[in-house]
Image (cartoon, grey):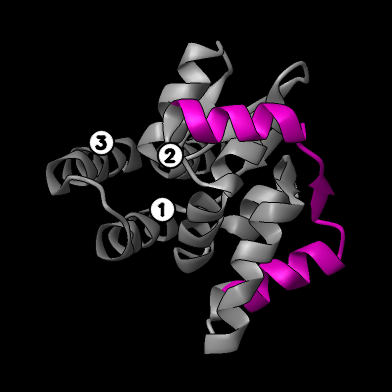
């Protein structure tokens, strides 16, 4: 499985301590624009930036190119940033799943019939496939609640489902 991930989702997965687990089981792709956006966090000494840099250095995250003209069109048509638009343009015509939590990015992916996931689905998937423990999944979801822009009740429902799956 190949996933093209945008900055917001990459940062949230890094902050929730599961991006390494994800990179161990799927091919994580990131456009240069997204990578540069994430790495800017090093100036503020943000751990997630250093983690993502290390994953790139160890080839756990590969840099890909989006289509410049399509990226510009997506930016205009969907009023989104270059990172999200480049991620979606990179996924067009390829067998990439688009990983974004950005509302405009999700809309653009749906309009263009691209397979789509977000942080919540990825954490749930990692748990259900046994890549992470229920404790790690629950901690990751709690960090998403803290750092993300998700509705609390959505995360609470997923946490409850994970508790029930735990047995």
Q: Nearer the viewer, mark 3 or mark 2?
A: 2
Picture layout, residue 81 above or below residue 17: above
The residue depicted at 78 percent of the width and 20 percent of the height is 94
Image x and y of residue 33, in percent: 69, 54
Image x and y of residue 4, in percent: 67, 38
Give SS at disc 3.
helix
Task: Locate residue 109 relative to residue 165 in the image: left or right.
Answer: right
Give SS at disc 1.
helix
The residue depicted at 61 percent of the width and 75 percent of the height is 40
Q: Earlier in the sequence, mark 1 or mark 2?
A: 2
Binning the other alpha carbons within 10 Å of mark 2 as few (below 14), some (14 to 19) or many (20 upward) gives: many
Q: Earlier in the sequence, mark 1 or mark 3?
A: 1
Question: How many angstroms separate mark 1 from mark 3 (CA)?
Answer: 11 Å
Q: Which residue is mark 3?
A: 161
Quadrant hosting residue 91: top right
Question: How many angstroms separate mark 1 from mark 2 (CA)?
Answer: 7 Å
Q: Are marks 3 and 2 in contact (CB under 8 Å)?
A: yes
Binning the other alpha carbons within 10 Å of mark 3 as few (below 14), some (14 to 19) or many (20 upward) gives: few
Q: Earlier in the sequence, mark 3 or mark 2?
A: 2
The residue depicted at 70 percent of the width and 20 percent of the height is 92
Quadrant occupied by the N terminus: top right
Secondary structure mostly seen in magenta is helix
Q: Which residue is mark 2?
A: 124
Q: Are marks 1 and 2 in contact (CB under 8 Å)?
A: yes
Q: Which residue is mark 1?
A: 137
Q: Does 72 appear in magenta? A: yes
Task: Locate residue 120 relative to residue 77 in the image: left or right.
Answer: left
Task: Between residue 67 and residue 139, name the one nearer to us.
Answer: 67
The residue depicted at 60 percent of the width and 65 percent of the height is 38
Numbered range of the magenta stretch? 49-77
């Amino acid at each position: 499985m190949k996933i093209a991930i945008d900055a917001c989702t990459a940062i949230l997965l890094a902050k929730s301590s599961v991006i390494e687990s994800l990179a161990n089981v799927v091919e994580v792709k990131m456009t240069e624009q997204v990578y540069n956006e994430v790495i800017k966090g090093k100036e503020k000494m943000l751990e997630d930036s250093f983690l993502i840099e290390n994953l790139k250095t160890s080839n756990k995250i590969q840099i890909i190119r989006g289509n410049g003209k399509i990226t510009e069109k997506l930016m205009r048509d969907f009023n989104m940033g270059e990172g999200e638009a480049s991620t979606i343009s990179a996924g067009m015509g390829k067998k990439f799943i688009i990983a974004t939590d950005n509302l405009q990015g999700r809309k653009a992916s749906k309009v263009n019939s691209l397979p789509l996931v977000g942080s919540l689905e990825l954490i749930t998937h990692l748990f259900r496939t046994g890549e992470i423990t229920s404790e790690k999944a629950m901690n990751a979801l709690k960090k998403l609640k803290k750092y993300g822009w998700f509705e609390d009740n959505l995360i609470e429902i997923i946490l409850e489902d994970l508790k029930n799956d735990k047995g």
